[in-house]
Image (cartoon, rainbow, N blue to C red):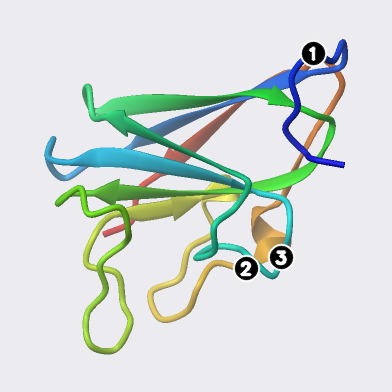
Amino acid sequence: MPAVKAHSQTISTVTIEASSFKNMRGTLNCRLFTKATDFPDGEGIVTIKTAITGPTTSCTFSNVEPGTYAVAVVHDENSNGRIDKNFVGVPNEGYGVSNNKTYALSSPKWDESIFSVGTSENKVLQIKLRY
């Protein structure tokens, strides 16, 4: 059963409020995940790309069914659709995850990034970008 589905009476929304942008170039890319194996660099189930409109920029996932999720966000400064990394794999662009547990030398962990969405809930998550 897909995690994001239209026409359900139990649908919810998840809004991401990303902050700490170092500049206004590019886009904010928000990706919603349902599986640890995909997180944080996989495809996820939905990706939203939005223009950076100010010091805090939002993206909203609609029609989210109740369940457990994680979110990864990237400040895609050059709008190439992915997070650019240096030769040792450290991101060159701003990134963040739900619950704001990021590490300098390793990827964010699923268990530290998950959150629950209930029935007919409007959840708001604040994510600070790390550069």
Which mark is first along the chain, 2 or 1? 1
- Where disc 3 sits, the SS reads loop
Which mark is first along the chain, 2 or 3? 3
- Mark 1 — residue? 7
Q: Nearer the viewer, residue 71 or 8?
A: 8
Residue sitting at x 33%, y 82%: 89
- Residue 104 in percent (x, y) is at 38, 74
**CA separation, marks 3 and 1?**
27 Å
* Residue 80: numbered disc: none
The three-letter code of the residue at mark 3 reads Ala
- Where disc 1 sits, the SS reads loop
Residue sitting at x 60%, y 53%: 44
Q: Is residue 21 visible?
A: yes
The three-letter code of the residue at mark 2 reads Lys
Direction from residue 13 to residue 42 in the image, left or right: left
The quarter of the rendered structure image containing the C terminus is bottom left
- Mark 2 — residue? 109
* Residue 36: numbered disc: 3
Q: Quadrant of residue 28?
A: top left
**CA separation, marks 3 and 2?**
8 Å
